[in-house]
């Protein structure tokens, strides 16, 4: 018993220790609840903690009469400040394991880090920008990791997901980190190492930069326009909304300043006042001008109405028939085609041979290694790339669009020409251009089953030996010339293969057309009849070929290249430009950028920039180098990029964003050429 009493006595507090513990409890009970608890606990948890503090304080009054053990005092203190259940479930340590800075950006297409103080302040005011995040558990799951970042950057929830980026060394450009880094803080730390900052970019939608926080921004100053006082940080933005005109000096680019324009306008007004002595004179003048303008407008409207009516009359049957075929598509079922950008034809053919391949299901294209969601852009680019590969691998001939099928019996055995026909039809239904590179003699065979090569010129003949023979026959001036040309071994083989049986020694100038027709009809049409018939079988998908035969003229542009030229006016006519409000700081920069854009289109058209003509620009913007016969289903919008060095395009409703940062046309032109030539697809 004595031993037990000694042990219990050793575990009790001395009077001095008791007094110190009582004071410590009183101090701790009066403290605010720590940030970690307030952030991770509910209001009920806070009230419960306060009740425990009060109970502990009351119990401390009885400590002198019946001193507790050291263990009980320690338990009392820990019970007041124990971590919440949520934190315990996450397995968080009371010690911070990693501190890391995150910079949340506002724009999906931003490729450069924020550098200016104005840009950084705008982000901070919007609840974005740079913030330091503490991690007490490095192995939390992907959802908990995401929610932690959403708590730090609330507007990020509206971005439709996000991705991590890091700054490229010795550069202001960023590169996307692996999606693995989104799984946990540990995975991110493993990838970034000692990098100080990780950038967060919204994935699907730009974030609003409307201010939700006020930042310290210096003393107040009076607005000279309205007389109200604003701190210096808000004064600049107030000036634009107050109606004060903000002018930008564009002297270097256009050779005259704003002040000069004002002087010229003043001069015009003075001359106008001198011209008219009375109100009646000026009224008569304006009535005459108004009448002239009405006549001009009426003429333009009548002409435009005729053009629009003609276009509608031509396209209406086409739209109606395509609409009928589209009704056969099962929109409840989706067929995804996964293809590699450099092997589109190979992958498309392999996918077509699989049992799951069903052209009557809704088609979606996924480029391997790219993150774009198919809202139209990936399909357009798929059919554009597919047409190029088909032209190079299954057709031969001139590059002007008049090409002929290549004889390929192995392809026939593998039914590849049938699948080409199916893909042709899908291209038409999903807004593509078909295969517009065939010679019209092939189109005539598909529609009328007639073999007629009367429109084939010597330059269109793909086989060089055949071209040489036909050319010699047509250029022959004597019977001997024809006989010599046809007696060469290779030439004779070509002629005999057609079934032409007249002896070479008996050939005359009267046989020239017969020889020419026999050679071309056989080697360009009859020789590939199996290929053409199988291709026609594929074209019958959705009943497409039947529609073509019923109205060949309407469907002809999907098979044969048209002569319609792509011009800057056509491209500008497709665009809807969205500017900032008049009087805003950004408006002059956007108007200047648009003029750069107009000049760039003109240069592509007039000067023929190497590797960057208007068709290349259209491909960069829409995914196809030719305007579809029915136009684009999506509207095309031109927006402006306040932050960023390069233009960006979007597949969700065709959009292009032009950077306004460049102050000279040469700089703008260089980045446009670099972006178009370096385009590697959607989401790449």
Image (cartoon, grey):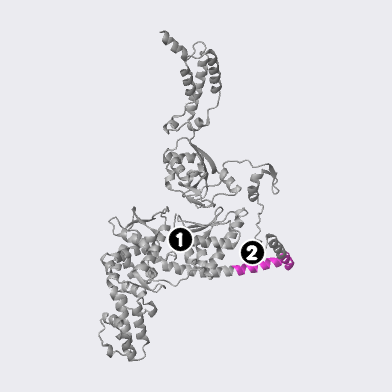
Does residue 308 appear anywhere in the picture?
Answer: yes
Residue 462 drawn at (x, y percent) = 36, 75
Of all residues, the one furthest to the top in this rendering is: 2
Q: Residue 652 carries which label?
A: none
Q: Which residue does the numbered mark 2 point to in the structure image?
A: 254
Residue 20 drawn at (x, y percent) = 55, 17
Instruction: Find out whether the residues at labels 1 and 2 contact each other: C-beta distance under 8 Å.
Output: no
Q: Which residue does the numbered mark 1 point to in the structure image?
A: 622
| Magenta segment boundaries in residue numbering | 270-293
Q: Which of 648 and 626 is in front in this view?
A: 648
Quadrant position of residue 426: bottom left
Q: Where is 461 relative to 255, above or below? A: below
Residue 640 drawn at (x, y percent) = 55, 56
Q: Where is 88 relative to 343, above or below? A: above
Quadrant housing the C terminus = bottom left
Q: Where is 218 relative to 85, above or below? A: below
Residue 5 drawn at (x, y percent) = 43, 9
Q: Which of 536 and 241 is in front in this view?
A: 536
Nearer-N-terminus badge (1/2): 2
Element class at badge 2: helix
Q: Residue at x 51, y 10 (%)?
A: 65
Residue 86 lies in magenta, yes or no?
no
Quadrant housing the N terminus = top left
Q: Where is 684 relative to 17, above or below? A: below
Q: In this view, does 537 lie to the left or right of 113?
A: left
Element class at badge 1: helix
Q: Residue at x 66, y 58 (%)?
A: 249
State the separation of the CA atoms marked 1 and 2.
31 Å
Q: Residue at x 32, y 65 (%)?
A: 420
| Disc 2: CA contacts within 10 A as few (<14), some (14-19) or many (>=20) | few
Overall secondary structure of the magenta section: helix
Residue 292 lies in magenta, yes or no?
yes
């Amino acid at each position: 018993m004595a031993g037990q009493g000694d042990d219990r006595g050793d575990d009790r507090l001395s009077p001095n220790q008791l007094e110190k513990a009582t004071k410590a409890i009183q101090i701790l009970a009066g403290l605010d609840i720590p940030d970690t608890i307030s952030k991770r606990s509910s209001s009920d948890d806070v009230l419960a903690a306060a009740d425990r503090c009060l109970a502990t304080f009351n119990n401390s009054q009885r400590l002198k009469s019946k001193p507790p053990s050291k263990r009980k005092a320690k338990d009392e203190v820990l019970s007041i400040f124990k971590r919440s259940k949520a934190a315990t479930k996450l397995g968080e340590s009371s010690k911070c394991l990693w501190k890391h800075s995150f910079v949340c950006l506002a724009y999906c297409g931003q490729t450069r880090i924020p550098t200016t103080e104005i840009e950084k302040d705008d982000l901070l005011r919007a609840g974005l920008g740079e913030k330091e995040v503490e991690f007490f558990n490095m192995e939390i799951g992907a959802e908990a990791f995401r929610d932690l970042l959403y708590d730090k950057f609330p507007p990020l929830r509206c971005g439709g997901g996000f991705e991590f980026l890091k700054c490229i060394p010795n550069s202001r450009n960023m590169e996307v980190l692996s999606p693995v880094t989104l799984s946990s803080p540990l995975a991110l730390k493993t990838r970034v190492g000692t990098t100080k900052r990780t950038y967060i970019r919204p994935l699907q939608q730009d974030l609003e930069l409307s201010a939700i926080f006020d930042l310290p921004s210096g003393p107040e100053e009076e607005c000279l326009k309205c007389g109200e006082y604003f701190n210096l940080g808000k004064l600049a933005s107030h000036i634009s909304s107050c109606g004060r005109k903000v002018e930008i000096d564009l002297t270097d680019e256009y050779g005259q300043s704003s002040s000069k324009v004002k002087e010229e306008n003043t001069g015009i007004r003075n001359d106008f006042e001198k011209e008219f002595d009375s109100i009646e004179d000026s009224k008569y003048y304006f009535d005459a001008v108004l009448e002239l303008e009405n006549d001009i407008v009426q003429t333009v409207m009548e002409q435009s109405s005729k053009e629009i009516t003609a276009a509608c009359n031509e396209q209406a049957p086409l739209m109606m028939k395509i609409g009928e075929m589209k009704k056969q598509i099962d929109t409840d079922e989706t067929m995804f085609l996964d293809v590699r950008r450099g092997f589109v034809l190979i992958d498309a053919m392999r996918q077509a041979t699989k049992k799951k391949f069903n052209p009557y299901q809704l088609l979606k294209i996924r480029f391997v290694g790219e993150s774009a969601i198919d809202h139209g852009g990936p399909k357009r680019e798929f059919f554009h790339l597919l047409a190029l590969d088909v032209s190079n691998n299954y057709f031969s001939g001139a590059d002007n669009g008049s090409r002929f099928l290549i004889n390929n019996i192995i392809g026939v055995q593998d039914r590849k020409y049938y699948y080409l026909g199916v893909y042709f039809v899908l291209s038409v239904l999903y807004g593509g251009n078909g295969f517009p590179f065939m010679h019209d003699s092939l189109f005539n065979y598909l529609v009328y089953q007639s073999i007629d090569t009367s429109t084939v010129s010597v330059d269109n003949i793909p086989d060089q030996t055949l071209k040489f023979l036909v050319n010699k026959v047509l250029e022959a001036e004597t019977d001997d010339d024809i006989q010599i040309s046809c007696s060469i071994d290779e030439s004779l083989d070509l002629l005999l293969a057609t079934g032409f049986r007249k002896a070479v020694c008996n050939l005359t100038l009267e046989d020239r057309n017969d020889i020419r027709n026999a050679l071309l009809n056989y080697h360009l049409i009859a020789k590939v009849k199996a290929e053409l018939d199988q291709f026609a079988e594929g074209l019958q998908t959705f009943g497409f070929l039947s529609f073509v035969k019923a109205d060949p003229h309407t469907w002809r542009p999907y098979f044969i290249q048209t002569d319609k030229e792509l011009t800057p006016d056509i491209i500008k006519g497709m665009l809807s430009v969205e500017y900032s409000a008049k009087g805003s700081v950004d408006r002059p920069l956007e108007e200047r950028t648009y003029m750069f854009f107009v000049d760039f289109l003109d240069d592509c058209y007039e000067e023929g920039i190497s590797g960057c003509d208007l068709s290349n620009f259209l491909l960069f913007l829409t995914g196809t180098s030719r305007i579809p016969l029915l136009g684009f289903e999506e509207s095309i919008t031109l927006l402006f990029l306040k932050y960023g060095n390069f233009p960006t395009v979007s597949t969700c409703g065709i959009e292009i964003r032009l950077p306004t940062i460049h102050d000279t046309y040469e700089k703008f032109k260089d980045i446009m050429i670099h972006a178009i030539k370096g385009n590697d697809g959607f989401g790449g």
